[in-house]
Image (tube, rainbow, N blue to C red):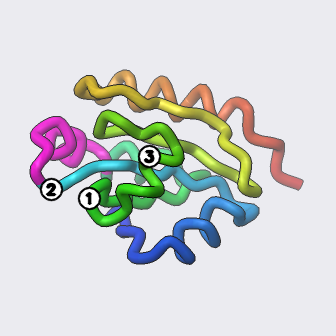
Amino acid sequence: MTVASVTSLDEYFTLVRGADPVVMVFSADWCPDCRYLDGFLADVAAARPQFAFYKVDRDAFPELCESLDILGIPSLLAYQHGRVLGRFVSKLRKTRAEVEAFLDDVAQRLPAAP
C-alpha cells in the first residue's frame, strides 16, 4: 500500500473532516527518523484498512504544523469527522511497535460500523 501525500490545505481539511478515519503522518524529506518510519509505514497501513493514511510535509505546511503543535517529526494524528482521535507527537524516532500500538488504541475507540 502506498501512502498518499497531502498537496493543499483544502485537501487536508476535507480529509480530516470526513466520515472515514484518517491518519496524518507529519514528516520531511530531510528527516532521518521519518525515513526510518517509511521503512514500515506502508505495511502497517496495509494491515489497518479501517484507516486512510496521508503524509504531510512539515516544510510545505509550516503554519499548519505550528497550529497543531507538531514541533517534532515524525508525528501522527488520527482524525474522524474533524475530531482528533489520537496524537502520537514527539521529536523521537517511532518504532514499528509504537506506531502499531498507537493505531490499535485509536482503532478500539472508533465507532462500530453499522
Helix, strand or loop at disc 2? loop
Q: Nearer the viewer, mark 3 or mark 2?
A: 3
Return the residue at label 2: 29
The picture places residue 112, in percent across and down from the top left corner, at 83, 44
* In-image side of 99 versus 57 (left or right): right
Kindly indicate whether the residue at mark 1 contacts the one at mark 2 (C-beta within 8 angstroms).
yes
Could you tell me the amino acid type at mark 3?
Glu
Q: Which quadrant of the structure image shows residue 32?
A: top left
Residue extent of the magenta highlight: 30-41
Task: Using the numbered discs, state the Cα–Cα distance from disc 1 to disc 3 in whole angstroms.
Answer: 11 Å
Could you tell me the amino acid type at mark 2?
Asp
User: For the residue carrying disc 3, how many other residues have a C-alpha within 10 Å: few (<14), some (14-19), or many (20+)?
Assistant: few
Residue at point 42%, 40% (across, down): 70
Return the residue at label 1: 59
Return the residue at label 3: 66
Q: Nearer the viewer, mark 2 or mark 1?
A: 1
Could you tell me the amino acid type at mark 1?
Asp
Q: Earlier in the sequence, mark 3 or mark 2?
A: 2
Q: Is residue 33 or residue 50 the one in the foreground?
A: 33
